[in-house]
Image (tube, rainbow, N blue to C red):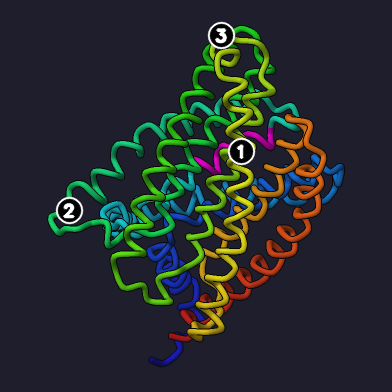
Amino acid sequence: MSRMPLGSVSLARPSRVGGLVEQLTPGYFALVMASGIISIGLELRGFRWLSVALFAVCITAYVVLLVLNAWRFVAYRHAMVDDFKNPKRAFGFFTFVAGTNVLGTRASIEHWYTLAVWLLVVSFAVWLVLGYVIPWSAVLSRSERPVVALANGTWFIWVVASQSVAVSAAGLEVVFAGPRAYLAVLAVLSWSVGVFLYAASAIIVALRIMLYDLDPKDLDPPYWVSMGAVAITVVAGARIVEMESAPMADAVRGLVAGFSVVFWAFATWLIPVLIAAGVWRHYVRKVPMTYVPTLWSIIFPLGMYSVAGIYLGRADHLPIVEWIGSNWLWVALTAWLVVFVAMVRNVGAALVRRDRT
């Protein structure tokens, strides 16, 4: 197709960008999650300016993605509805919940507590609605069986969303004395739901891997969320352990502390497994290594594992765990930089390609 005249560029631009908006993946809020959690890790380590820079990226990405998703809902609602019905993509919508809570948790570090409260209110409402809508629209209402054949790593994002509510609620529990008992109930409730959801998701995904043919392309980045979901369960548990005295917090503190150590050990065990899967996918089966938005589903677990180690080490007085988390932070930050540069280049190239058609 020939290039449009210069005078038509202003008219062509909305169509060019609009095409990218129509194809926007529901899980792109993982960019917010990854940037926010690494910012938190840098703040915990005392690297103030680096943390602020990542926080700025987190805020910018959150606002931009809100605008793009609103645009997509208005102009390309059919595409969004199709995603809600797709078991391979629908659970990606939970990244909005997790991204909102990661942003709120980072805002709390700056003492922006009012903003953090509103973000928790929004995320809790969306988590509650999506928790019933997505399993029905993407799984239970489908006529074909077995649906387990369509399960993938994105299903663990539901767990991450649940635990992100627990992290945010537990963090605010120590700040607000009035609603302390209610925030403690919310933190423990969402943590407990997240634990059971992880068990259910792990069983379903494991059955999919063992019972059905697994193409190397199917073993994609979201499978790393299986580790990130455990890591955020550790962080939520550590924050619950650190909560001020409240009936619900006092009732489960010892149990949650013990389980958090077990979950951290399991997250550590998963890392070599996931690395081996990546080696098999890219070097043995020769799947090309290119930028895809779901790569942020690797960066978030890396950052969350670091923060999990730092929080757990401090909450349970485990210096070796804190040391591992502190040093792992540089792995997460390096990976974030690589994927961020790849994303910028990919988006730029996509805009240029559409400009030439």
Residue 247: give its label: 3
- Tag 3 or tag 1, which sits nearer the N-term? 1
Q: Amino acid at mark 2?
A: Arg
Secondary structure of the residue carrying tag 2 is: loop
Q: With 31 as the anchor, is 354 left or right in this view?
A: left
Measuring from the top left, give residue 114's x and y in whole percent.
63, 23
Quadrant (top left/top right/bottom left/bottom right) for the C terminus: bottom left
Q: Are marks 2 and 3 in contact (CB under 8 Å)?
A: no
The answer to whether one can see residue 13 in this image is yes
Q: Residue furthest left?
A: 143
Measuring from the top left, give residue 182's x and y in whole percent.
52, 13
Q: Which residues are magenta?
A: 97-107
Secondary structure of the residue carrying tag 3 is: helix
Q: Is residue 104 above or below residue 29?
A: above
Q: Nearer the viewer, residue 1 or 206?
A: 206
> Marks 2 and 3: which is nearer the front?
3
The answer to whether one can see residue 76 in this image is no
* Mark 1 vs mark 3, CA separation in Å: 21 Å
Q: Is residue 328 above or below residue 212?
A: above
Crowd class of label 1 (few under 14; some 14 to 19; many from 20; radius 10 Å): many
Q: Nearer the viewer, residue 311 or 320?
A: 320
Quarter residue 299 falls in: bottom right
Residue 137: give its label: none
Instruction: Determine which residue is flagged by label 2.
Output: 142
Q: Amino acid at mark 1?
A: Val
Q: Main secondary structure of the magenta part?
A: helix
Measuring from the top left, give residue 333's x and y in whole percent.
74, 58
Crowd class of label 3 (few under 14; some 14 to 19; many from 20; radius 10 Å): few
Secondary structure of the residue carrying tag 1 is: helix
Q: Amino acid at mark 3?
A: Pro
